[in-house]
Amino acid sequence: METELFVGGKWVPASSGARFDVLDPATSGVIASVADGGVEDAIAAVDAASDALPAWTATAPRVRSEILRRAFELMTSRTDDLAKLMSRENGKALVDARGELTYAAEFFRWYAEEAVRADGTVTTAPSGANRIVVIRQPVGVSVLVTPWNFPAAMATRKIGPALAAGCTVVLKPASDTPLTALAMAGVLAEAGVPAGVVNVLPSRSSGKVVSAMLRDPRVRKLSFTGSTEVGRILLAQAADHVVNTSMELGGNAPFLVFADADLDAAIEGAMIAKMRNAGEACTAANRFYVEAPIASAFAERLAARMAALRVGPGTDENTQVGPLVNEDTVDKVDRLVRSAVQEGAKTATGGTRPDGPGFYYPPTVLTDVRPESRILREEIFGPVAPIVTFTDEAEAIRLANDTEFGLVAYVYTGDLARGLRVSEGIEAGMVGLNRGLVSDPAAPFGGVKQSGIGREGGHEGMLEYLESKYIAVSW
Ligand code: NAP
């Protein structure tokens, strides 16, 4: 297990010598002590990324592509070991950790394929006087900041396109889960990524180190995944230095079920949309809106499925729902459930925080939730499904859009025309139509409103790391 900073192709201690502990969410015990990068280390990482930039940009796209492809193969061959490491620091069940690693590795494969397709355009100016030649060039040194909920995938979703585009990076992983990011730095180095192209800087002083990097004029890009609250702070800082930004922020996904939906499929989709990663996902269904005639049948069946889930340590092969990542997250989930119940919601299953060690919260279904309840306004980030009923399509769309967020929505209906109409009417960057899972490395992932700016994945994901240069030329 690597526990030092990864800067300029070397494992190095923090210049201050400081370290911080990483906890096991299943026991609250310490599992590792990791070097705690400070401002000096952050600037050293930017030095390394900046020094490595010209050669990496000049490296043939095919060579960059083959390195990414090797990283995909190495990650895939180590899925089991990486899954155990991730499960230990994040708490997620091994089945979720393996699923995440498959998804995470796919970003390397997809961007290995995209690396050779940074195409430009040539057109004739409307006046006929000249040609308009547009070429794509890497934006430059990129700072990548990632959350704890998908410690591998949120990093590869940024590193893959950045490297494919010819950028060099400094990754600052979440301090709850730095070990997976450090393990991936090892994988990338082994795959042939040259020294300085990828640097990884765990830190307990995220605010200070990220600000210091944004103030450095060599840094030309910030790609952030995390809460809307922190995203707003970083957007303001990036504005001061006019740094190119991509922001993947919070969600508050509605899950709409119309009476004409296939109920079996809707329950299956609800379990995936709600319970992947124990609900700790920006894409997690946060608000269930079910058409009145089927609302009680849906709630009953969902509660039965949720109650049957096996909760336990993530590293236990039988576990389906691991502990949440830390105590603050359990406190927040518990507070939201209790306030909904005080307002009149009924608990169909779960709803009681267990005693004992570890950061556990049981799968919970709430019915009769008041539409203005806090639990429907904030990201729950836990295994809780609040259900509200609606009476017609217009009301369903109004309720779905009644949020400042707009990342993803889920719609279940047997009427395709209605499904597409509702999908168009919902203010979100993504819609799962009769599907509980939308994430796909080949598709553009991202949100509108307070859920972010920009897209990751697909061809769009690489454009975030490329600038268009226009050359006016006559021939
Ligand atoms: P967070 O608190 O915003 O932290 C995200 C990252 O930012 C971490 O690396 C964190 O470091 C760092 N950070 C915190 N404060 C900072 C500051 N002032 N300046 C610079 N960096 C700072 O979010 P989180 O709790 O880790 O993750 C959960 C959130 O991420 C949820 O809102 C979820 O919806 C969102 N998310 C969005 C997507 C998406 O694609 N839209 C995907 C996954 C998650 P520390 O760990 O050291 O605090």
Image (tube, rainbow, N blue to C red):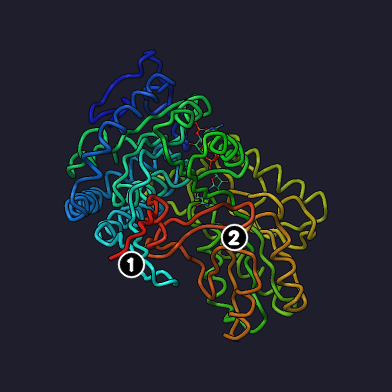
Q: Amino acid at mark 2?
A: Ala
The quadrant of the rendering that contains the C terminus is bottom left
Up-down relation of residue 294 to residue 203 (above or below): below
- How many neighbours does mark 1 have within 10 angstroms: few (below 14), some (14-19), or many (20 or more)? few
Give me the C-alpha separation between circle 1 and circle 2: 44 Å
Q: Amino acid at mark 1?
A: Val
Would residue 472 appear left or right of 304 to someone viewing this image?
left
Residue at the spot 45% in from the left edge and 39% down from the top edge: 145
- How many neighbours does mark 2 have within 10 angstroms: few (below 14), some (14-19), or many (20 or more)? many
User: Is residue 113 among the parts visible in the rendering?
Assistant: yes
Give percent across and percent down for residue 82: 30, 44
Mark number, residue 285 = 2
Give the quarter of the image for residue 412. Answer: bottom right
Give percent across and percent down for residue 27: 47, 33
Mark 1 / mark 2, whichever is N-terminal = 1
Q: 183 or 124, which lies in front? A: 124
Give the quarter of the image for residue 326. Answer: top right
Q: 307 or 139, which lies in front? A: 139
Q: Residue furthest right?
A: 343
Mark number, residue 122 = 1
